[in-house]
Image (spheres, rainbow, N blue to C red):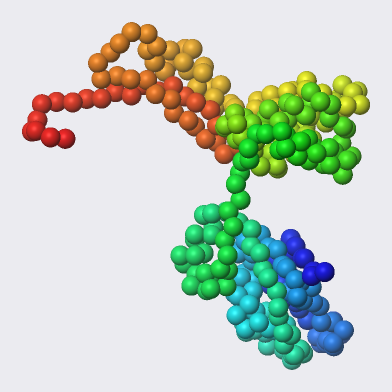
């Protein structure tokens, strides 16, 4: 079948290829055996998958990829010679015809940034696919989640999860989705809990991971990041933050502010006040 290549380190040389040199008494020499293929060569006739953020973090890699896609050719040329950093005699391999589908993985923010500020982006990458961060909570998806847990444990030498342990992971997935009728598809966060629950099971000498171990892993994960929430609760207990929860007051209502810390969020009760005064008609 067609090759599928995922390049984890998409710098210029790894994408386009390079020509290596040997130093012989201060003289740089090379020959055709020193020509190294890049990811575009390995994926030619198939698919190349790249993380957009990683690609853009390397100088010249993005421009080199666009040039290859626009010309439909791979031209191996040392970056030092191409940009005039170092002028030395080098090989000039013949261009190779390119037929590849490039898949970029990135955030919506990065997509719209490239779409608005890079005129080549919309011409070269015409198809956009949004992946939902949640899925329906139904029997089929719960079975798929259980299968994912089992497969990940087998492939990474983790202890097996019993029914209660799987149920706790599914419950945690629902909490991450912030909807009791949904499951999250942010599997990286689920995997973190699997590893931590496995570690707690190991500390207790258990051969299987139970719901107790999963609950402990989740609680400890929260403890590591909820220091601000504990401080806010402390201020309420010490009457530093004041919120009336009984009676009525004119122009005052209680609200709930959600504080997002990236990997953790919590609610903080807040007092909202309104002041008005006589004036001209209208708002």
Give the side of residue 264 with respect to residue 200, left or right.
Answer: left
Question: Which of the pair 28/141 is nearer the observer?
Answer: 141
Residue 85, x across and y down, in percent: 64, 81
Quadrant hosting residue 126: bottom right
In the picture, the quarter occupied by the C terminus is: top left
Q: Is residue 275 visible?
A: yes
Q: Residue at x 64, y 58 (%)?
A: 105
Question: Which of the pair 177/78 is nearer the observer?
Answer: 177
Q: Residue at x 47, y 67 (%)?
A: 117
Q: Residue furthest front?
A: 139
Quadrant hosting residue 244: top left
**Is residue 221 positioned above or below 51 on the image?**
above
In the picture, the quarter occupied by the N terminus is: bottom right
Residue 143, x across and y down, in percent: 76, 36
**Is residue 126 positioned above or below 197 on the image?**
below
Q: Residue furthest left?
A: 280
Question: Which of the pair 207/275 is nearer the observer?
Answer: 207
Q: Residue at x 79, y 77 (%)?
A: 37
Q: Residue at x 50, y 22 (%)?
A: 232
């Amino acid at each position: 079948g067609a090759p599928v290549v995922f390049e984890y380190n998409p710098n210029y040389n790894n994408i386009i290829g390079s020509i290596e040199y040997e130093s012989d008494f201060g003289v740089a020499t090379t020959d055709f055996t020193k020509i190294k293929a890049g990811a575009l060569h390995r994926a030619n006739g198939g698919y190349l998958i790249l993380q957009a953020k990683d690609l853009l973090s390397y100088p010249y890699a993005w421009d080199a990829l666009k040039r290859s896609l626009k010309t439909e050719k791979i031209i191996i040329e040392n970056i030092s010679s191409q940009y005039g950093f170092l002028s030395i005699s080098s090989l000039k391999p013949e261009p190779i015809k390119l037929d590849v589908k490039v898949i970029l993985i990135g955030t919506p923010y990065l997509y719209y940034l490239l779409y608005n500020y890079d005129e080549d982006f919309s011409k070269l990458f015409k198809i956009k696919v949004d992946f939902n961060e949640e899925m329906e909570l139904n029997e089929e998806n719960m079975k798929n989640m259980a299968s994912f847990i089992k497969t990940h444990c087998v492939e990474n030498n983790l202890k097996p999860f019993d029914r209660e342990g799987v149920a706790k992971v599914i419950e945690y997935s629902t909490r991450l989705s912030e909807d009791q009728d949904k499951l999250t598809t942010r599997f990286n966060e689920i995997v973190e809990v699997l590893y931590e629950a496995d570690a707690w099971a190991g500390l207790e000498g258990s051969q299987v991971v139970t719901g107790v171990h999963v609950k402990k892993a989740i609680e400890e994960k929260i403890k590591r990041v909820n220091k601000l929430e504990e401080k806010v609760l402390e201020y309420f207990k010490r009457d530093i933050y004041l919120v009336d929860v009984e009676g009525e007051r004119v122009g005052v209502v209680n609200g709930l502010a959600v504080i997002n810390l990236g990997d953790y969020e919590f609610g903080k009760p807040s007092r909202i006040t309104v002041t008005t005064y006589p004036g001209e008609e209208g708002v």
